[in-house]
Image (cartoon, rainbow, N blue to C red):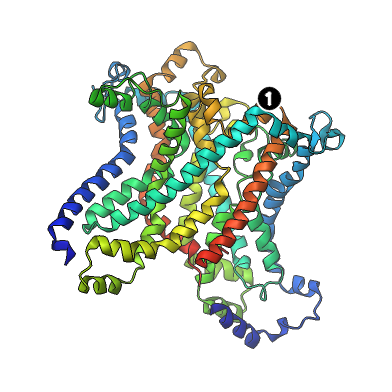
């Protein structure tokens, strides 16, 4: 609708812009302020986003810092072959996928349910109170939360283990020192941090439901549960599809900040993910070429997934981001 | 009315209790840290502090604020947050205006827009990025905390979408009166977009204050770390050796109450801007997502 309006308006006010014959520099001169305005940002992007993309050639080299990009030996796909032969890198990819997928599912499901429950609360004061508290963790960094969690989950007098021992009399659980417990802790704490913020979009969707639907259901004698099942949930499905598909791009994103601030050598086997692995192999151990190759592997897969998910979101829910 | 049915009333009571408990779970960890930071050392070490300070004392905060490295890192964090936010806002504001035009009004707009968006979809990864920072000589330089993240494409898109909502008549009137595009942007668009800019500023501030990895990667001298990186090193890695302090200071910094005080001070600025954030971010999200 708006596009039509602007087109019309363009035709009326500046019909000169339309002819195809004008050479490109005509527009460049006529619209120079626009170019100047984009230029500073573009310069930053060229240096800090596009220049590193050029560095991806390292993935096909046996990169040695003293030889540089031009002098290092070309090894073709050897780094990638190596990536799929090394047991630790395969384990790392698997860890990443499993942690990321669990997070994706729960971070969709938890806010969905929470938003519905929150919507049932009529007392504005209670609603406001709940919202204020649940949004908060989203804004705190994993350094802060990691520090807090390591303290809370400690086996030596951490609050959680104290409670568990006090209430159920069980032995302290090694949350951050046992691989399986580590995965569980990482997934649950991520959901804890993000579920509140995740409700924002769902609450917006709930606010947009036409009240007359509920009134009609009321007249027909539907219980609140029936109303939720047949009005609320279906109304939220489109936005849930959008959120879910857009999260697809994160299959290889298990949350670097979180893992890095919670893990330790004891749980590398089950808790090490691609990003932390790259940091250790490339930056700490100096295997630059190999590190770049894993990074490229991750970037390409994520890119493909993001593109697919955007198309899916558009097809399934008619959602466009740009 | 379902509100009156006994079953719904029971549900409502349980629901209210459940949600209040869940929401308390979101802040209890922070309250616990706060309580520990205000407790006496003996009580904290004996793990008897819950959500209320035991033997109240401000000792830990005094010790924290007496540590010159901590204060310096806090100052660096403030500097990067202020400078970084101003730069990000300026760049986003400037770039969003032409990018908010239709391609017919700004030839090349779509090419630019895709160059911006593509950086969100694909990146070179950690290693090439690290090499670029090294090559252009930003290592161990304060500006490494500011420049690489100066263009925030997400915030630029939020700004762009806001500009699209500004009535076209405003711009047309200015242009007819003879103002150039720069003049239009700064005297017409700037005043009307202050609420949007405030939202962007809050997002950017939180981002900068919380950033810790860049400091760890690119700053070699731990005494020049921003606060988040300092906290990461001291509290998460428990690596005090790099701080080259005398043993007495070391013992002090690793003390549980002092650690808690440091964590709380690290979270404090976020808590302070949180009420404003909460007011704005819903609008910001809506601002970025709603398109006709």
Q: Is residue B133 left or right of residue A236?
A: right
Instruction: Residue at 57% x, 26% y: name it.
Output: B222
Foreground residue, B280 or A107?
Answer: A107
Instruction: Residue at 52% x, 60% y: name it.
Output: B158
Looking at this view, name the residue that lies furthest to the bottom: A12
Instruction: Residue at 72% x, 35% y: name it.
Output: B134
**Element assignment for label 1:** loop
Q: Quadrant of the C terminus of chain A?
A: bottom right
**Rendered position, B198 above or below B191:** above
Answer whether residue B90 is visible to the viewer in this image: no
Residue identified by numbered label 1: A285
Number of marks: 1
On the image, the x and y values in percent for residue B208 come to: 52, 43
Q: Is residue A129 left or right of residue A274?
A: left
Instruction: Residue at 50% x, 73% y: name it.
Output: B292
Answer whether residue A87 is visible to the viewer in this image: yes
Quadrant housing residue A59: top right
On the image, the x and y values in percent for residue B244 come to: 55, 17
Foreground residue, B195 or A56?
Answer: A56
- Dot 1 falls on which chain? A
Foreground residue, B35 or A89?
Answer: A89
Q: Is residue B93 left or right of residue B5?
A: right
Foreground residue, B182 or A289?
Answer: A289
**Rendered position, B64 above or below A216:** above
On the image, the x and y values in percent for residue B154 come to: 56, 55
Q: Residues within 10 Å of mark 1 (few under 14, many from 20)?
A: few
On the image, the x and y values in percent for residue A90 come to: 63, 33
């Amino acid at each position: 609708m708006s596009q039509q309006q602007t087109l019309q308006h363009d035709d009326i006010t500046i019909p000169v812009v339309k002819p195809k014959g004008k050479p490109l520099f005509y527009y460049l001169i006529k619209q120079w302020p626009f170019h100047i305005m984009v230029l500073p940002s573009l310069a930053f992007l060229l240096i800090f986003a596009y220049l590193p993309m050029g560095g991806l050639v390292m993935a096909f080299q046996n990169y040695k810092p003293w030889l540089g990009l031009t002098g290092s030996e070309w090894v073709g796909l050897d780094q990638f072959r190596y990536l799929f032969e090394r047991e630790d890198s395969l384990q790392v990819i698997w860890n990443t996928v499993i942690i990321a997928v669990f997070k994706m599912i729960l971070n969709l499901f938890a806010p969905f349910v929470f938003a519905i429950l929150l919507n049932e609360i009529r007392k504005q004061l209670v609603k406001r109170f709940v919202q204020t508290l649940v949004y908060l963790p989203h804004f705190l960094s994993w350094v802060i939360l990691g520090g807090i969690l390591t303290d809370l989950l400690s086996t030596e007098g951490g609050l959680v283990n104290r409670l568990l021992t006090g209430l159920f009399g069980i032995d302290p659980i090694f949350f951050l020192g046992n691989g399986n417990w580590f995965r569980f802790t990482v997934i649950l704490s991520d959901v804890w941090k993000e579920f509140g913020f995740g409700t924002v979009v769902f609450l917006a969707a709930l606010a947009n439901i036409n009240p007359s639907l509920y009134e009609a259901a009321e007249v027909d004698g539907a219980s609140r549960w029936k109303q939720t099942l047949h009005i609320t949930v279906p109304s939220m499905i489109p936005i849930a599809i959008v959120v879910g598909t857009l999260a697809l791009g994160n299959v290889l994103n298990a949350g670097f900040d979180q893992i890095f601030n919670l893990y330790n050598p004891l749980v590398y086997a089950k808790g090490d993910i691609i990003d932390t692995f790259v940091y250790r192999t490339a930056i700490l151990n100096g295997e630059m070429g190999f590190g770049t190759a894993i990074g490229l592997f991750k970037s390409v897969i994520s890119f493909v997934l993001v593109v697919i998910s955007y198309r899916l979101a558009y097809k399934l829910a008619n959602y466009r981001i740009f | 009315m379902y509100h009156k049915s006994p079953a719904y009333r029971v549900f409502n009571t349980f629901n209210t209790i459940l949600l209040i408990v869940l929401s308390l779970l979101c802040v209890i960890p922070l309250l616990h840290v706060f309580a520990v930071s205000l407790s006496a050392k003996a009580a904290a070490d004996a793990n008897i502090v819950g959500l209320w300070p035991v033997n109240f004392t401000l000792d830990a905060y005094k010790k924290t604020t007496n540590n010159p490295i901590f204060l310096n890192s806090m100052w660096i964090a403030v500097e990067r947050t202020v400078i970084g936010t101003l730069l990000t806002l300026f760049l986003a504001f400037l770039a969003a205006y032409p990018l908010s035009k239709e391609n017919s009004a700004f030839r090349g707009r779509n090419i630019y827009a895709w160059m911006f968006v593509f950086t969100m979809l694909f990146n070179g990864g950690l290693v090439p990025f690290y090499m670029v920072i090294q090559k252009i000589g930003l290592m161990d330089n304060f500006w490494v905390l500011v420049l690489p993240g100066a263009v925030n494409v997400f915030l630029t898109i939020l700004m762009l979408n806001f500009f699209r909502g500004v009535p076209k008549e405003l711009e047309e009137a200015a242009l007819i009166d003879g103002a150039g595009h720069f003049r239009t942007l700064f005297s017409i668009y700037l005043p009307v977009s202050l609420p949007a800019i405030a939202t962007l500023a809050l997002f950017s501030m939180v981002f900068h204050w919380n950033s810790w990895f860049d400091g760890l990667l690119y700053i070699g001298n731990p005494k020049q770390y921003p606060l988040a990186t300092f906290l990461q090193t001291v509290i998460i890695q428990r690596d005090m050796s790099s701080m080259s302090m005398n043993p007495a200071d070391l013992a002090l910094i690793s003390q549980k109450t002092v650690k808690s005080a440091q964590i709380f001070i690290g979270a404090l600025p976020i808590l302070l801007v949180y009420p404003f954030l909460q007011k704005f971010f819903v609008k910001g999200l809506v601002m970025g997502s709603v398109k006709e």
